[in-house]
Image (cartoon, rainbow, N blue to C red):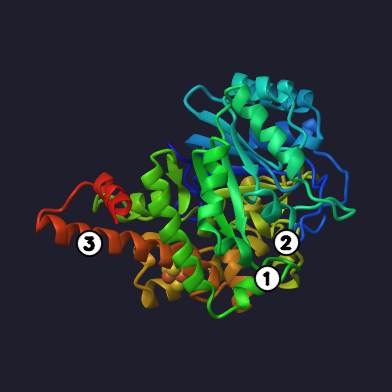
């Protein structure tokens, strides 16, 4: 039962906590937006215990709480750091709440000890790899500009040898958009079954030329359509986030509303290594903005969650993000599967939270929804009036 707020407003529900154990990253990808990736600070254990004590005491934690260790390269800290952190959180966890840890890594520092930790704690592992060597090394480079493919693929192969489940996130460049066959061949050769794509986007200081190009939506649509078809024909790809998440959102029971954690205060609670606390899109943490106090709503070491929720920065962001959601609700036919988009992209592309469509939502919401619905239409025509189960939509893509 969530504690009600004295204001009578509905209480937040914290579903995801994004923890930045360190802002430091051992590499320097050309499209990186993290402003503090040279800083070697690390989150003290006291920040972690204070954070989770306050979350669990608030009554605002969802029954299933996901903790994502990210926003820097988490594996630059030792395995023992996470053993201690996970044990501390476990000691504080109320029995009715399930906590699942997740780590997003460039994979270069993986060792058998990391694999043992992941298995022991059932950690969700995501590896950032951009496809075959030439595509990956074009952008994912060290500070001296050398490609990082060799170390990343060694890490990925280690995960497979050690039977650690993982997914990959691949950033798509102009070149990879032309190469769905080469991308798929790479995943199949490496036994990658769960795949997420990000089109290189403009965020923070990074301006993506791809986002600015007028024909990127068409090229992405062609890429995704072709990749989906080939992947299903292969029978060896279990999950394509852009398609499978969208199918779930389109074909959901009427009574299930469309939740969007990025537009609800504290649905995502994002904490920097010094305890500075933010919400909404995780990428906001670390960016500068005078109007919203650099998106910092307080510090978990000194402020209560209630005080942060009622504070000036949170109030201003909540108001403006809600205005942006309202614009989406009134103007966009994809609202029922999107729920109002990503505030960080509205801000960086449109200049404000209180705005509607972006290139980002065109790529991540509209095009996947169009592809899924086009497949459904074709399937309906093939089968007559009777609506098929969603699995048949995937089968149709394979048959096309
Ligand atoms: S698809 Fe874009 S315009 Fe439509 S609801 Fe989502 S964010 Fe808003």
Task: Give the image location of residue 347, x and y in percent.
Answer: 62, 72
Q: Residue at x 57, y 45 (%)?
A: 186
Q: Does residue 101 appear left or right of residue 146 in this picture? A: left
Q: Which residue is mark 1?
A: 208
Q: CA distance from mark 3 to mark 1?
A: 35 Å
Disc 2 to disc 3, C-alpha distance: 38 Å
Under circle 2, the secondary element is: loop
Q: Earlier in the sequence, mark 1 or mark 2?
A: 2
**Horizontally, is 52 left or right of 254 in the view?**
right
Mark 1 lies on a secondary structure that is: loop
Q: Nearer the viewer, residue 60 or 28?
A: 28
Report which residue position mark 3 lands on: 378
Q: Which mark is residue 31?
A: 2
Q: Is residue 113 above or below residue 329?
A: above
Determine contact: label 3, label 1, CB under 8 Å: no
Gap in Å between the C-alphas at discs 1 and 2?
8 Å
In-front residue for pair 32/92:
32
Which mark is in front, 2 or 3?
Answer: 3
Q: Residues within 10 Å of mark 2 (few under 14, many from 20)?
A: some
């Amino acid at each position: 039962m969530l504690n009600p707020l004295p204001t009578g407003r509905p209480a937040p529900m914290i579903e995801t906590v994004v923890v930045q154990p360190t802002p430091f990253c051992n590499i320097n990808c050309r499209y990186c937006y993290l402003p503090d990736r040279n800083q070697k600070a690390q989150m003290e254990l006291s920040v972690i215990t204070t954070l989770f004590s306050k979350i669990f005491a608030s009554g605002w934690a969802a029954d299933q709480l996901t903790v994502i260790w990210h926003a820097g390269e988490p594996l630059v800290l030792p395995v023992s750091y996470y053993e201690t952190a996970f044990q501390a959180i476990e000691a504080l966890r109320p029995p009715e709440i399930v906590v699942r840890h997740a780590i997003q890594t460039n994979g270069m520092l993986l060792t058998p000890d990391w694999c043992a930790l992941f298995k022991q704690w059932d950690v969700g592992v995501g590896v950032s790899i951009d496809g075959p060597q030439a595509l990956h090394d074009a952008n994912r480079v060290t500070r001296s500009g050398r490609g990082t493919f060799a170390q990343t693929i060694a890490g990925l192969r280690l995960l497979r040898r050690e039977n650690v489940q993982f997914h990959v996130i691949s950033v798509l460049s102009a070149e990879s958009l032309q190469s769905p066959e080469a991308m798929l061949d790479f995943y199949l050769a490496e036994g990658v079954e769960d795949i997420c794509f990000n089109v290189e986007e403009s965020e923070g200081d990074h301006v993506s030329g791809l986002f600015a190009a007028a024909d990127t939506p068409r090229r992405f649509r062609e890429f995704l359509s072709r990749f989906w078809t080939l992947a299903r024909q292969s029978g060896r790809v279990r999950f394509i986030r852009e398609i499978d998440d969208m199918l779930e959102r389109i074909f959901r029971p009427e009574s299930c509303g469309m939740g969007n954690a990025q537009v609800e205060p504290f649905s995502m609670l994002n904490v920097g290594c010094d305890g500075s606390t933010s919400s909404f899109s995780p990428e906001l943490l670390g960016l500068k903005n005078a109007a919203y106090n650099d998106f910092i709503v307080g510090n978990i070491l000194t402020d209560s969650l209630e005080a942060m929720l009622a504070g000036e920065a949170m109030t201003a962001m909540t108001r403006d993000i809600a205005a942006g959601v309202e614009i989406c609700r009134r103007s966009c036919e994809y609202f029922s599967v999107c729920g109002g988009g990503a505030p960080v992209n509205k801000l960086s592309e449109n200049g404000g939270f209180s705005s509607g469509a972006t290139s980002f939502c065109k790529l991540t919401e509209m095009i996947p929804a169009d592809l899924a619905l086009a497949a459904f239409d074709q399937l309906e025509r093939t089968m007559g009036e009777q609506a098929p189960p969603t699995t048949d939509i995937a089968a149709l893509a394979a048959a096309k």
